[in-house]
Image (cartoon, rainbow, N blue to C red):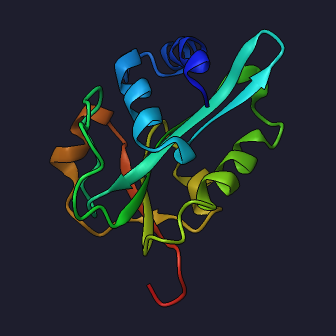
Amino acid sequence: MRAGDLDGVLALADRVHPGLPESRAVFAERLALFPAGCIVLARAGGVAGYAVSHPIRPAEPPRLDALLGRIPTGATQYYIHDLALAPEARGTGAAAAAVSRLLLAAPPYPTTALVSVYGTAGFWERFGFRKSGEDMAAKLAPYGAGAVFMVRANRPGD
């Protein structure tokens, strides 16, 4: 992802996540803070997919549409903040390729976490993510009914 992709990322986010809006500033900040965790799927006509990820403190996903200011001290968990594909890019293997690419940045951290929305937990389970046993109800409320906090170990034994 590059700064020039942000308008396309925001347009796609608005299209696929109408109930989970985030500002351009959020995407720009994540790109500035952790560029290795921000990717796009470019297709003719613009951005057909994107992913945003960065380190967090364990089990402390950021609020929606909130700026971080910085990667927090004690950020020992890799976090996939968002993965979105345009409907026309789904079923092409692009999502699996994006997850594999994101997980290349994960090994320095014991675990990777995410918030599964829209009933996508089964997709994430294919990559080793499991529902967290932590009580996350209050933190997940803004993500909508059915949101699930999921975690996977990045290193054997973690």
- Furthest residue toward left: 138
Where in the figure is residue 42, as x and y percent of width and height? 75, 24
Residue 94 seen in this snapshot:
yes
Residue 144 seen in this snapshot:
no
- Left or right: 113 in relation to 9: left
Residue 158 location, quadrant: bottom left
- Left or right: 17 in relation to 90: left
- The N terminus lies in quadrant: top right
**Residue at point 58%, 61% (across, down):** 125
134 or 48, nearer to the observer:
48
Where in the figure is residue 99, as x and y percent of width and height? 64, 51
- Left or right: 95 in relation to 10: right
122 or 34, nearer to the observer:
34
45 or 21, nearer to the observer:
45
**Residue at point 63%, 63% (across, down):** 127
Residue 74 location, quadrant: bottom left
Q: Is residue 43 above or below residue 72?
A: above
Residue 6 location, quadrant: top right
Where in the figure is residue 151, as x and y percent of width and height? 43, 65
40 or 4, nearer to the observer:
4
Q: How many marks?
A: 0
**Residue at point 22%, 59% (across, down):** 73
Where in the figure is residue 55, as x and y percent of width and height? 38, 55
- Left or right: 105 in relation to 158: right
